Image: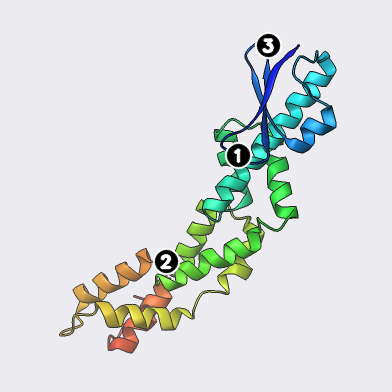
Amino acid sequence: MRIDHIEASRRKKGRVLVFLEDGACLKVTEQELLDFGLRSGDELEEGTLERLKKAAGVSDAKAAAADLIGRRAMSRRSLEQKLQEKGASQAEARYAGEWLEAIGALNDKEYAAMLVRRCGDMGYGPARAREKLREKGVPRELWEEALEELPPAEEQVDRFLAARYRGGSLDRREQKRLADALLRRGFSWSDAREGLNRLGADITEDE
């Protein structure tokens, strides 16, 4: 396969576009251009072309990964899924994820802690935080340590009840409304019951 022409990318600094005679365009780095000794008009043997395509695929995945992680934090699993959605192979996506971890741009442990702190800031309880960790692809083995970032449930529940309790009679209907709201926010029934009792209800453990 012959190289038709080579030009620098106008969109990405340090990227080079290698156009082949069949119309294909390979995106490589300047270093890969030097490593392969690429020049316009060169004939590429089949083995060299395959290695070049592989290198180009990895370079493209790494560039896409850096762009994604630069826009917002995410877990490695989510990053690799998004790369594959953009056309990267599983191996290319994995390599890009490993590369970002190696340079310190991707860290699931720090990301998990950040997610949980955000949940705490929004007044969510442990169950809601766990759901968010699952949704964002954080490895399960990191959950428990991350959940230590949540404020004490008692503090969160009391703050929520202070904001939502309208005053007046704390009858069964009002208790249910407040308890259901706490459950939806990820707190346990035990947390909700104890919070309501601190507010003046008299709910036993059997209820």
Residue 26 against residue 191 in the figure, above or below? above
Relative vertical location of residue 101 with respect to residue 57 in this rendering, above or below: below
Say whether residue 56 is left or right of residue 204: right
Which of label 3 and label 2 is nearer to you?
3
Q: Is residue 204 visible?
A: no
Query: Comparing marks 2 and 1, which lies closer to the viewer?
Result: 1
Whole-percent x, y for residue 18 in the image = 69, 24
Residue under label 3: 21
Identify the secondary structure beneath mark 1.
loop
Is residue 60 depicted above or below 155 in this figure?
above
Q: Which badge, 3 or 2, comes first in the chain's sequence?
A: 3
Q: CA distance from mark 3 to mark 1?
A: 23 Å
Point 53% across, 54% down: residue:
134
Q: What residue is pinned by disc 1?
A: 12
Left/right placement of residue 137 relative to residue 8 reads left
Say whether residue 60 is left or right of residue 197: right
Whole-Å distance between the Cαs marked 2 and 1?
44 Å
Which residue type does callout 2 highlight?
Answer: Gly
Q: Earlier in the sequence, mark 3 or mark 1?
A: 1
Percent position of residue 23, x then y: 62, 13
Residue at (45%, 78%) from the top-left corner?
A: 153
- Can you identify the residue that label 2 sits on? 186
The residue lying at 41 percent from left, 79 percent from top is 156
Q: Amino acid at mark 3?
A: Glu
Q: Relative to 153, is 33 on the left or the right?
A: right
Query: Nearest the camera: 91 or 35?
Result: 35
Few, some or many residues within 10 Å of mark 1 (<14, 14–19, 20+): few
Which residue is drawn at the image coordinates 34% and 75% (left, top)? 207
The image quarter containing residue 161 is: bottom left
Give the number of the disc on residue 147: none
- The amino acid type, in three-letter code, at marker 1 is Lys
